[in-house]
Amino acid sequence: MTARKKISGAEAIILAGGSGARMGAEKQYLPLAGRPMIEWTVEAFTSSGLFSKVILALGPENLAKYGPAWEKAGVATAPAGATRTQSLRSAFKLVSPGARLVAVHDGARPFVDAALIKACLEKAGECGAAVPAVPLKDTVKKTDAAGTVFETTPERSSLMAVQTPQCYRREVLAGILGRAASQKDYSDESQVLEQLGIKAAVVPSSYRNIKVTTPEDLVIAEAFMKEEKTVAAHVRAAVSRAGFGYDIHRLVEGRPLILGGIKIEHTKGLLGHSDGDVVLHSVCDALLGSVSAGEIGVYFPPTDLTIMGISSVEIARKTLEVLSSKKARIVNLDVTIVAEEPKLKPHYEAIRDSVAKIFKMDRSDVSVKAKSREGLGDIGHGEAMVCYAAASVIK
């Protein structure tokens, strides 16, 4: 899926706490084309490039079992409730106060694409609420209360089957949750809109954007996957790749010494167009190299005066965006700093913790160490500092 320009202040909630009663199993984690269905759904949102945050609501068992892995992958998790509305309330607590738009999607709807998501977000920004839908194919009839005989035939031309993602301005969704009856469940949150005097805009959708609810739906979903031209790339075995990074900066007086995103007390700091953080620079170059995406100078050229003094944490964030667009996941980092001064061994763990946090990794997957030049050359004379980094990723 092609990454698209991020929509300012957009966040997504994916509801995956259903029991799957009609499926006979927990549908979100049923295999689809070699992967759990929920992974396809979440990937549609994370790879779209439209969202600053994706929140996944999971049932208690799945939250305990899979929650840490989702968090590590950059997806926030929330405990699902007994009903859809309760799950949405739980996930909405994690929506950023500054979020402008919120998309709400079914975890069992894996065929949504970036174009539909973007269209729904844009329409919600204009109208307050937007719901994707398709015209009904079949004639619809209303039965009596017992469901034994047909009574009336509604006019089909004015009826549509609604889907997700249903998108809202943040304050509209907050209003829906505030108005929704506490004990009542709703098949979708837009049902409450009429009580707020808001009409949701219709966004034309595709019949492929199905919700996998029954065993028959799963058969259809597998058939759709086989038709996808890119299915081979999606189900291929993950490949391990490695990258190498190197950086050097002069040590000068009057500059703070920043290594791995933290400040270390010293009489000198690293001279550079940015904050001179040789650790983050070398790590970013190693990661970019692992996915054949150039080096940090491509994204932050030293000739650009508008980024003078930029924190290298921002460079790391851009690197993570590039990795995400390449569908690459960091496996481990190995960092070696070469410096005569200051002595860095007392700072190993602090640097390690900081690097792990910046790159959203477990600290057990980050190694930091330092070596000296035994008084040889510029580094040995305390005039410069070098850092080497090796990175491995799965792509």
Image: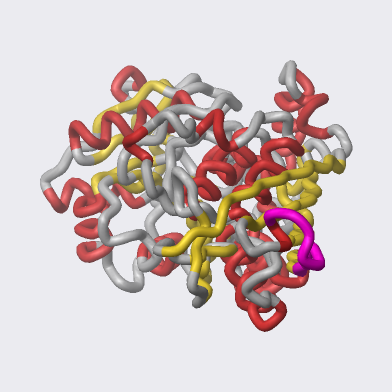
Residue 334 lies left or right of residue 61; in this view the side is right
Q: Is residue 105 above or below residue 208?
A: below
Q: Give the quarter of the image for residue 178.
A: bottom left
Outermost residue on the bottom side: it is 346
Q: Relative to 63, is 188 on the left or the right? A: left
Note whether 261 is above or below 245 in the view shown.
below
Is residue 153 something one can see in this rendering? Answer: no
Q: Residue at x 31, y 40 (%)?
A: 8
Whole-percent x and y of residue 291? 73, 34
**Residue at 74 percent of width and 48 percent of height:** 36
Q: How is the image coloured?
A: secondary structure
The residue drawn where x is 57% and y is 52% is: 250
Where, quadrant-wise, is the N terminus in this rendering?
top right
Residue 207 place in picture, x, y as percent: 54, 23
Q: Position of residue 328 (x, y in %)?
A: 71, 41
- In which quadrant will I find the C terminus? top right
Using the image, determine if residue 92 lies above or below residue 33: below
Q: Which residues are magenta?
A: 369-378
Q: Between 291 and 276, which is closer to the camera in this rendering?
A: 276
Q: Position of residue 223 (x, y in %)?
A: 76, 25
Query: Which quarter of the picture shows residue 244?
Result: top right
Q: Viewer-proximal residue, 117 or 207?
A: 117
Confirm whether residue 170 shows in the render: yes
Does the segment drawn in magenta span residue 302?
Answer: no
Give the total of numbered labels. Answer: 0
Quarter holding residue 180: bottom left
Q: Foreground: 56 or 227?
A: 56
Residue at image point 45% right, 43% down:
273
Residue nearest the viewer, comparing 62 with 243: 243
